[in-house]
Image (cartoon, rainbow, N blue to C red):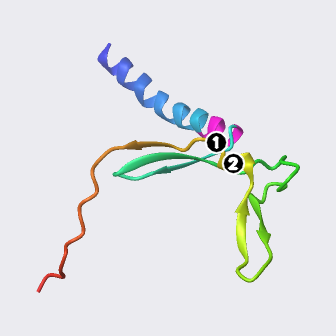
Amino acid sequence: MRVRIAVLVAAAVPVTVAVAAAVLEAGRWRLYADRHRIELQPRPRRSCPVCRGAGGWWVDGANPEMEACGCWTTRRELRLRLQPVAAWPDEPPF
């Protein structure tokens, strides 16, 4: 009985990862994960009539800069913190 449960759990992991990847792609999310955090960041929509999937446009002038499109900047970014990041030392070690 325990072997059967272990096999079912082992088989469920790849299926869960594949389904999660498909959902993230369909919802236009970018997944970032490391030992400190898991982040879901919005991506620009390819069907956006304003930016056409580029995420923004360049503004001319003395200091050209990128202006972000509202198709992704107004969406929430989700972050789950896992482990705290160690503080940087004030001085280098000698």
Q: Residue drawn 74% across and 83% down?
A: 62
Amino acid residing under circle 2: Trp
* Quarter of the picture holding the C terminus: bottom left
Classify 58 as above or below 8.
below
State left or right for residue 26 relative to residue 18.
right
Q: Quadrant of residue 79?
A: top left
Check residue 17 for magenta coloring. Answer: no
Check residue 23 for magenta coloring. Answer: yes
Q: Which stretch did the figure color magenta?
A: 21-26
Extreme-bottom residue of the structure = 94
Which of the numbered marks, if any, corresponds to residue 75? 1
Mark 2, residue position = 72
Q: Judging from the image, what secondary structure is the residue with disc 2 in?
A: helix
Residue 18 place in picture, x, y as percent: 59, 37
Label 2 Cα crowd, 10 Å radius (few <14 / some 14-19 / many 20+):
many
Q: Are marks 1 and 2 in contact (CB under 8 Å)?
A: yes
